[in-house]
Every structure is written in C-alpha cells, then in structure tokens.
Amino acid sequence: MPDLSKTAYVILGMVRMGRRTGYEIKSLVDVSTRFFWAASYGQIYPELKRLEEAGLLSGEPDPTGGRQRRAYSLTEEGEVALHEWLTSGEPIHFELRHEGVLRLFFSDALAADERRELLRAIRAGHEQVREQLSSLHNGGEDLEGAPRDVLEFGLAYQDFITEWCERLERGQEG
Amino acid sequence: MPDLSKTAYVILGMVRMGRRTGYEIKSLVDVSTRFFWAASYGQIYPELKRLEEAGLLSGEPDPTGGRQRRAYSLTEEGEVALHEWLTSGEPIHFELRHEGVLRLFFSDALAADERRELLRAIRAGHEQVREQLSSLHNGGEDLEGAPRDVLEFGLAYQDFITEWCERLERGQEG
DNA sequence: GGGCTCATGTAAGTGGTTACATGATTAT
DNA sequence: ATAATCATGTAACCACTTACATGAGCCC
C-alpha cells in the first residue's frame, strides 16, 4: 500500500459512492469537495490509470453508443486503502492560502478608505462563494449524512469570515 | 510592471517594514504570514534576485564580520508595485485545503466511533495551531495595527473550526 | 448546421517544498 | 569543542493548473 496523494483518495471516495467515469468524478468534485479539495482532469485521468494499475480500482470499457467511456469501481483493496486513510493517525494536513488576509496584513501601508475597500472586497468574495454553496444546498434536497454536514460547515465558514470582515469594517468607520 | 507572484508581494511587504535580508524575511514569514501564506528559501532567494533585477528592490552587501549578507530595501517602483497590489481590483485568491474536512466528507464509510475519532483529530490540529498563534500574541505585546488584527483573526479562525468540530462531536454521541 | 454537453487525454508551465551544500558567528 | 543560529543558495522533485487536441451524441 504505497502512499497515495490526497487526490487519489478523493477519487477512491467518489468511486466508492458508485461506479464512476473520470468525467463524472470531475463533475462531482466541482460541486462538492472543490471548496476544500479541488481536482482537475490533468490529475484525475492519470491518477485513475495509476489506481487501476495498483489494483485499487477496476476499470471497464463502458461506451455510450459509439462514444468511448471507461467506468471504474472500487476493488476490495481500494476499499481497504480508503478506510485506512480515513482512520489513519497521520497528521491531517490543512492549509489556508488567503490573498485577502495577506493584503490585510500589509494594509498599514494603506489609507483608511483603501483599507475599508479591501475589507469590502474580501467580504464580497466570501459572500459569492456562500451563494454558490447555498445553491447546492437548495438544489440537493436529498443531501444527507456527512456531505450535508460538510456543506453546512462550508456555509458557516463563509459566514464566519464575512462577519469578521464586517466587524473590522465597522471598527474602521468615522 | 509585470505580474508578480503573491510570494513576491510577501517579500515586498516585509521589506517595506524595514531593510531585510532573505534570512530575516523567511524568519518573519514563519512567525506571521505563514498561517495564510507560507514561503520557503527556495522561493525567497530567487525571488529577491528577480525583484532586484526588476528594479523593485535594491540590494546591497551588508556583511556581519566575515559573513556574507545582502540586505534589500524597497525602491520607489517597489513601493508603487506593492501599493498597486494592495488596492488592485483583481479577484482576490483564497483557498482552503483541508484533508480533515475531506475525510469527513467521505466519513459515511466509517463507524460512529471512527467518525468521532476523526473529528477529535481535526479539532486537535486546530487547537495546536491556536496554541502557536497564541504564543505569538503573548510574545509580541507591542503588536499593533493590521498584523494584530490578522493574528486575532487567526485565533478566532482556529476557534471557529474547533467549535464546529465540538458541535459535530456532541451531535454524534450515544 | 451549430452549439452544448459528454468524454478522454496530454504537454507545458507554475508554484511550491525538501533536501542538500557551504560556511561564518555566537552561545554554552 | 561543539552545537545552535545566521546566512545564502541550488537541484530535484511534486502537485497542480491551463490550454490544447480530439471526437461522439444531443438539442434547437
């Protein structure tokens, strides 16, 4: 069981929920994990190949009409690898990369109105993401279990930063 | 004014606060912006060279005894470039990469006790970062202005996630 | 016919980390 | 003396994005 990239686990996790093509995985990622773990075709397709070679996925041709397509399902070993990762005691990696907070850190170089405008722009960014998440929430009435919890975390997270911006904006008034 | 990397702006911002060597910049980053924008020597030294060539920084030899050292200060153009970035209307990039939330997203594959343990592990990670930030807060009594605001955001941020974990842990009891 | 979506893939480039190499200075 | 810190740098590698290439099927 060699170390897999986190993106490999995203794929295993998505395939576990049902037989999937690379295209489907990408579409799913884009409306779910994207907000805390993104993936592009450039990662997904090569990774699917590697995971099949490693025996964690089994792929079969699954054409629709004359259109080529390959669908993958989890093997027993894939299931085990996913479960091991989910329960692994390894340090859990998390990072925030936030250009807005970075700008703010250096914002003593700004005039008061410029700084307020910066805060407003940061807030606007998070409000926009909030809207995107919110539309997923309404679109998927059937959403249940962990994915629902995580989506709700996403909403609360955007709100937290939004409110923090508002508080600082208020503190700058006058 | 060609597009600079965000890390270039970190450097400009750090140099703006006073003449700096690459080593000092790295040390400063490690106790301040690291939590929302990190930088390694492998980025800093080459970037310092490029910024000097581009005329945004001016570097001068500044040996301590027989030990070579090069100190940089902001040029007028550097000041302008930094200010332009701070006030730029360009979309502000922010991303969260969180393996814990990712695991949680797939945690319907886990037993209840495994899921609780996962939440505990995520929480522990954020509590640890909170401690690190907190020690910076106490160490730097003189901390003022934007850097203080940002540090306090960092603390509140860790607390927010910690509390969210606690809430989910409670929701899983019994 | 034209444009959208489904579908798979690759090449080039970006941005970043890690590990290493080197050596002077300072503190114990 | 020796360990830690100050100080600069590079090479190899890694993860990931972007842009491109290709083509089928579906809807108007």
Image (tube, coloured by chain):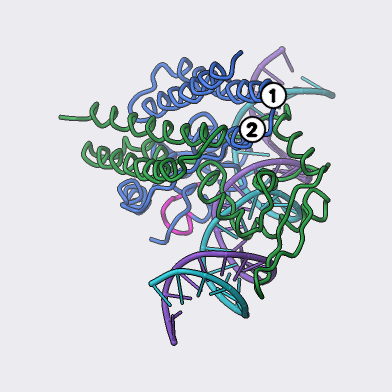
Chain colours: A blue, B green, C cyan, D purple
What's the chain of the residue with tag 1? A
Q: Earlier in the sequence, mark 2 or mark 1?
A: 2
Residue A117 lies, in percent from the top left, at: 66, 21
Residue name at image x 83 percent, y 50 percent: B55
Give the magenta range: A51-60
Mark 2 to mark 1 CA distance (whole Å): 9 Å
Residue A107's disc number: 2
Residue name at image x 65 percent, y 56 percent: B43
Q: Are marks 2 and 1 on the same chain?
A: yes
Instruction: Tell me where residue B163 sits by quadrant.
Output: top left
Residue name at image x 79 percent, y 38 percent: B80
Residue D3 as seen in the image, left or right of residue A97? left
Residue A135 as seen in the image, left or right of residue D27? left
Q: Are marks 2 and 1 in contact (CB under 8 Å)?
A: yes
SS for dot 2: helix
Q: What residue does disc 1 label?
A: A114
Dot 2, how many residues are within 10 Å of its Cα: few (below 14), some (14-19), or many (20+)?
Answer: many
What's the chain of the residue with tag 2? A
